[in-house]
Image: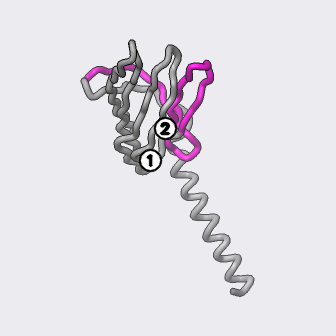
Amino acid sequence: MTPKRIALVVVAGCLLLMAATVEAAELSGSWKGSLTGSNGSSGEVQVDFSPQGFPLYSYTNNKGVVRQVELSHVGQTVEYVPAGGGVQRVVVKTLEKEQGRLAIGIGGSFERASQGYLDQQPMGRRLRTH
């Protein structure tokens, strides 16, 4: 490959990288709005986005440490022990990301042990931004 051709490939690669960065930056920072659960309940929330434009799931574990996880693909599971014990599980059920739009379906459960028995409480959330 000649030096001139290598330079063209590098420039083309940089242009593609810049185009992807601009698209991802469309969903950056924070978004405030209403979150609706599968049972029809809703509440106001704030969603922070990663530099890649995916939502960040924030939680506090049983040691008081705040963590954030980028929710980037279907099937992704986040598990942690919240204050008070048990296990909180969050699963990305659906994820549709297009230019200027994001739709994500999140399911999960909370499991706690009481007198040796496991108690599961399912949850579901859906987020749409435009």
For residue 35, which numbered disc appears in the image?
A: none
What is the three-letter code of the residue carrying label 1?
Answer: His
Residue 112: x and y in percent read 41, 19
Q: Indicate the position of residue 48 as horizontal and vertical percent values.
A: 53, 32
Name the residue located 27 percent from the left edge and 28 percent from the top edge.
Answer: 38
Where residue 41 appears, as percent x and y from the top left, is 29, 20
Where residue 29 sits, quadrant-wise, is top right
**Callout 1–callout 2 Cβ contact below 8 Å:** no
Image quarter of the C terminus: top left
First of labels 1, 2 by sequence position = 2
Residue that badge 2 annotates: 55
Q: Is residue 61 magenta?
A: yes
Which residues, given as a range, are shown in magenta? 40-69
Q: Quadrant of residue 16?
A: bottom right
Residue marked by disc 1: 73
Q: Amino acid at mark 2?
A: Pro
Percent x, y for residue 70? 53, 40
| Magenta residue check for 82 | no
